[in-house]
C-alpha cells in the first residue's frame, strides 16, 4: 500500500528535487574571491556560546560580537573577521541592514550593532550604512543600496511555517499580502526584485532565542521560545533557512512530538530553490559547520 | 408590570450594547483596572482593512473567518508587565467558535462558552465574540489578573450562541470534544493536521470544515475531517483530487492502509466530504466516514 505524504516526506521531497546548487549566492564576495570553500556545497556556519545570554536571558553583547566574528571568518575561510567583512563589502558600498522589528521577537540590537561595527571596520562610511525593516522600499539609503545584510530571528509562522531570512525580505514587496497565499510559497521571488537581486552579501539567522511554536493572536507565546544561544550565518538565504528549519523541526519533535515536528508547510524554502533558483535547500548540498558550544545543539 | 416596563425602557439601550454591536462600545463597560494592572494608552479598534496594522503577518488567520473588528486595550503594572485584551467580533457564534477551536492546547478555564488558560495566554469565546488576553512580562504574576479580566469581560458578550451546525454531524462515541476544530480554508487545516503541501481538497472561504479526533472505548481511534462545499460537484471533485494525491492506492471504498499510520478513507454524500486519517481499522474508518449521512441514530 502506498503511504500518504507526511510532513517529513514533504521536507525530504522538496530537498531531493533540487536541480542545482546556489547560483546567486556564495560568489558575491567584494574582493572577487570565491567566498565559500567547496563550490559544490553551500557553507552555513552555526555558532553557539553558553554565555550569549545571561541567567536573566539578557543578551551578552561582547559574546555575541565574538560569535558573529567567528562565524563570518569561518564562512569566508579568513583568519581575521575584519578581513572577512572586507570580503563581503567594499568601502564605497552603500549597505542596507534589513533587520526585523516584530515586537515580540525582534532582531537583537547587539547583533545589529555588531554587524554595523564590522561594516565600518571594513571601510564602509557610517553614513552609508542603514538599518530598516518596514520602510525599506522607500528608505533613500535602501533605494540606492549596493549591498544588503539580511538579519532576523528564526521562528515559526502560522502561514509560512517558518519565518527566516527568506521571509525577512517581504518588506521589499509592493504588496505583502500578495505573498501570503499558498503558505507564502512565493517568498523566494523577493530575491529577484530589482531592489534586491544580487545585493545580499550576508544572511544572519538569529537563533539566540528561537521560537518553535506559535500561539495566541500574534502567534507568539513565551512558552515556545528557548535559549539556544546560536547564530546561523551564510551567504545563501535558502541554505540558512533550511538549516533553521532543521533546528525548529528538531525542537518541535522533542517538545511537541513527532506528529508536530514540522511546522505547517514551510514550502517556500524548497520553492526558493527549485522554482526561483535563489539558493539551495538540499541538505546534501549544504556544508553545515558548527562552532563553539555543542550542548543540546539538536542539529 | 409597570415597573417591569419601566426597567425595560431604562435598560434597553444597555441591553443592545451588551448584545453585541461595534466592539468599541464595549470599552466603557470593561474595567480600566484589574488588580495591579491599569489601562495604558488609548483603546484601539481594527477592522478587516486595518487588521494588518495590528497583526504583523498574522491577519490572514482571522480574515479566513468572518472577522469584523477587534477591540484592543493594553494594561500595565508598575513594573511594566503588560496585559493585552483583544475582543474580536467574529460575525457569528459559529465563527467565534471556529477561531477559538483552531488553537486549543491548554486546560479549560471556565470562562465564556469555551476557554483555555496557560501561562501568559487566556482564550475564550462567547456569542459572536472571541477573546484573548496575552501577557508580556511576568506571566506568573499576571495569572490572577488575566483570569479576573476574562471573567469581567465574558458577561458583557452575551447571549451565548450555538456552535456550528456541522459539529452536530460528528459521531459522539469516542469524540475528544476539546480537540474539535471548525474552519474554512487550507491555512487552518495545515496548522491543525498535515494532509498535503497543496490545497488538494480545494478549500476556500466558502467551504466549512470540521476536524475531530476520536478515541473510542473499544480501543479504536482515528481522525475525521468533514468538509461542506457549496455544491455536490465540488465535493466529488475534491474527493477525486484527494484520492489521486493522497490515497492513490485506495480500494473501491476509497480506503487504504497508510503504512504504520492506520487507515485513511474518503467519501462524499451530496455536498459533504468525509476524510478519515489514522483509523485503527477500515471498519472504524468507515463508521466515522458514515457520519456525513446525518447525526448518528
Image: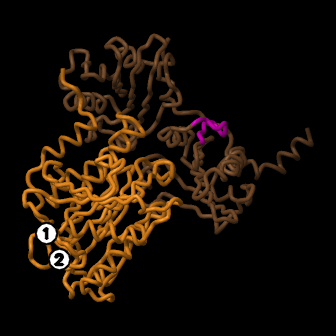
User: What's the magenta region?
Assistant: B107-117
Q: Say above or below: B221 vs A99.
A: above
- Report in which chain the residue with disc 1 lies: A
**A141, B207: nearer the viewer:** A141
Q: Quadrant of the N terminus of chain B?
A: top right
The residue lying at 17 percent from left, 60 percent from top is A43
Chain identifier of the orange chain: A
Where is mark 1, residue-wise? A35
- Residue neighbourhood size for the residue with mark 2, other residues' Cα within 10 Å, grouped as few (<14), some (14–19), many (≥20): many
Q: Where's residue B108, x and y in %?
A: 61, 35
Coordinates of residue A66 in the picture (x, y in percent): 33, 70
Residue B266 visible to the viewer: no
Mark 1 and mark 2 in contact (Cβ < 8 Å)? Answer: yes
Spatial CA span between label 2 and label 1:
8 Å
Colour assignment, chain B:
brown
Identify the subunit bearing mark 2. Answer: A
- Give coordinates of residue B284: x percent, y percent: 37, 14
Say what secondary structure mark 2 lies in. Answer: loop
Amino acid at each position: 500500500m502506498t503511504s500518504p505524504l507526511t510532513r517529513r516526506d514533504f521536507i525530504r521531497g522538496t530537498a531531493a528535487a533540487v536541480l542545482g546548487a546556489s547560483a546567486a549566492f556564495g560568489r558575491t564576495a567584494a574582493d572577487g574571491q570565491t567566498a565559500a570553500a567547496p563550490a559544490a556545497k553551500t557553507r552555513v556556519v552555526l555558532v553557539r556560546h553558553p554565555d550569549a545570554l545571561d541567567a536573566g536571558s539578557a543578551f551578552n553583547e561582547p559574546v555575541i560580537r565574538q560569535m558573529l566574528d567567528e562565524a563570518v571568518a569561518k564562512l569566508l575561510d579568513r583568519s581575521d573577521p575584519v578581513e572577512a567583512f572586507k570580503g563581503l563589502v567594499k568601502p564605497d558600498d552603500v549597505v542596507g541592514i534589513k533587520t526585523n522589528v516584530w515586537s515580540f521577537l525582534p532582531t537583537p540590537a547587539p547583533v545589529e550593532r555588531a554587524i554595523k561595527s564590522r561594516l565600518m571596520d571594513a571601510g564602509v562610511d557610517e553614513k552609508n550604512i542603514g538599518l530598516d525593516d518596514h520602510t525599506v522600499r522607500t528608505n533613500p539609503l535602501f533605494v540606492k543600496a549596493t549591498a544588503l545584510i539580511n538579519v532576523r530571528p528564526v521562528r515559526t509562522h502560522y502561514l509560512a511555517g517558518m519565518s527566516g531570512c527568506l521571509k525577512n525580505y517581504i518588506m521589499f514587496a509592493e504588496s505583502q499580502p500578495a505573498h501570503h497565499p499558498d503558505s507564502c510559497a512565493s517568498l523566494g521571488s523577493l530575491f529577484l526584485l530589482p531592489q534586491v537581486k544580487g545585493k545580499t552579501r550576508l544572511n544572519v539567522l538569529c537563533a539566540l532565542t528561537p521560537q518553535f511554536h506559535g500561539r495566541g493572536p500574534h502567534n507568539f507565546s513565551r512558552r515556545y521560545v528557548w535559549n539556544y544561544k546560536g547564530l546561523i550565518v551564510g551567504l545563501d538565504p535558502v541554505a540558512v533557512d533550511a538549516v533553521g528549519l532543521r533546528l525548529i523541526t528538531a525542537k518541535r519533535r522533542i517538545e511537541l512530538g513527532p506528529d508536530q515536528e514540522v511546522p505547517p508547510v514551510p514550502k517556500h524554502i524548497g520553492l526558493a530553490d527549485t522554482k526561483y533558483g535563489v539558493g539551495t535547500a538540499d541538505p546534501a548540498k549544504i556544508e553545515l559547520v558548527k562552532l563553539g558550544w555543542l550542548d543540546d545543539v539538536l542539529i | 408590570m409597570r415597573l417591569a416596563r419601566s426597567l425595560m425602557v431604562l435598560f434597553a439601550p444597555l441591553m443592545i450594547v451588551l448584545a453585541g454591536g461595534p466592539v468599541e462600545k464595549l470599552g466603557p463597560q470593561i474595567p480600566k483596572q484589574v488588580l495591579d494592572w491599569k489601562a495604558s494608552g488609548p483603546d484601539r479598534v481594527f477592522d478587516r482593512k486595518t487588521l494588518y496594522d495590528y497583526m504583523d503577518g498574522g491577519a490572514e488567520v482571522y480574515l479566513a473567518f468572518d472577522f469584523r473588528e477587534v477591540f484592543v486595550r493594553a494594561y500595565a503594572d508598575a513594573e511594566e508587565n503588560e496585559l493585552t485584551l483583544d475582543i474580536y467580533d467574529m460575525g457569528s457564534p459559529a465563527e467565534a467558535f471556529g477561531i477559538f477551536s483552531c488553537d486549543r492546547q491548554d486546560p479549560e478555564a471556565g470562562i465564556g462558552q469555551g476557554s483555555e488558560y496557560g501561562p501568559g495566554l487566556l482564550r475564550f469565546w462567547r456569542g459572536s465574540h472571541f477573546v484573548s488576553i496575552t501577557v508580556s512580562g511576568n506571566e506568573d504574576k499576571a495569572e490572577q489578573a488575566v483570569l479576573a479580566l476574562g471573567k469581567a469581560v465574558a458577561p458583557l458578550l452575551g447571549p451565548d450562541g450555538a456552535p456550528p451546525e456541522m459539529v452536530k454531524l460528528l459521531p459522539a462515541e469516542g469524540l475528544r470534544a476539546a480537540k474539535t476544530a471548525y474552519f474554512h480554508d487550507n491555512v487552518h487545516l495545515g496548522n491543525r493536521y498535515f494532509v498535503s503541501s497543496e490545497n488538494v481538497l480545494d478549500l476556500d472561504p466558502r467551504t466549512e470544515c470540521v476536524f475531530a479526533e476520536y478515541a473510542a472505548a473499544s480501543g479504536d481511534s482515528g481522525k475525521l475531517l468533514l468538509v461542506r462545499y457549496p455544491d455536490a460537484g465540488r465535493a466529488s471533485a475534491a474527493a477525486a483530487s484527494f484520492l489521486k494525491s493522497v490515497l492513490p492506492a485506495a480500494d473501491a471504498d476509497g480506503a487504504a492502509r497508510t503504512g504504520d499510520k492506520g487507515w485513511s478513507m474518503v467519501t462524499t454524500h451530496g455536498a459533504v466530504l468525509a476524510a478519515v486519517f489514522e483509523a485503527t481499522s477500515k471498519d472504524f474508518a468507515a463508521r466515522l466516514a458514515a457520519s456525513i449521512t446525518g447525526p448518528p441514530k
